[in-house]
Structures are given as structure tokens and as C-alpha cells.
Image (cartoon, grey):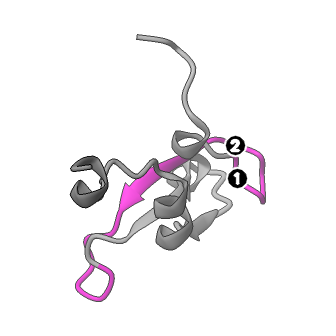
Amino acid sequence: MSSSSSPAQTKRCPYCGAAMVLRVSKSEKNRGKPFWKCLTSYGATSCNGFEWVDVTSAQAEQPDDTYDATVLNM
């Protein structure tokens, strides 16, 4: 496995520049919604960096593996 990650898997905190980790909300209101959390948020020097993932943009960047069967049946 390569040590490099795709841009969708890595992000830098816009506040402190530290790495961010992708998490999924477990709260009742936002259950299943992905978000970025700054890794320094868990230490003594916390910047509290947090961003919701724009799911519509993330889905638009994913390749579409579906096809129209009527096009294939020529």
C-alpha cells in the first residue's frame, strides 16, 4: 500500500495548520454526517478546528459506476 493519501482523505486545519482527521458524527441530530476535526483539538494546545464535510461536493467528485443498460443493448 502506498504511503500517499488521496486529497479526500487528508486535510490541514485552516486555523493552526495541523493535520485533521475525518470522523463521522454519532449525535442524534447529525448521525452519520462526516466532519473534519483538528488533531490538536485532543491535546493541551487545542485550536478546536472543525468543519462539516460537504457531502454533495464529495459525491460529485466520486466516479459514477452506474450505467444505462439500454445504451449497452444496441
> Mark 2 is on which residue type?
Ala
The stretch of residues the image draws in magenta is 12-30
- Residue 5 placement, left or right of 49: left
Q: Where is residue 61 shown, x and y percent of the image?
A: 55, 54
- Residue 73 placement, left or right of 7: left
What residue is at 48 percent from the left and 12 percent from the top? 2
- Residue 33 placement, left or right of 9: left
* Residue 28 location, quadrant: bottom left
- 74 or 34: nearer the eye? 74
Residue contact at pointers 2 and 1, CB within 8 angstroms: yes
The secondary structure making up most of the magenta span is loop
* Residue 34 location, quadrant: bottom left
Q: Estimate how packed mark 2 is, as few (under 14), some (14 to 19) or many (20 or more) residues with alpha carbons within 10 Å.
A: some
What residue is at 70 percent from the left and 53 percent from the top? 13
Tag 2 residue: 18
Relative to 56, does residue 66 appear above or below in the rendering? above
Q: Estimate how packed mark 1 is, as few (under 14), some (14 to 19) or many (20 or more) residues with alpha carbons within 10 Å.
A: many
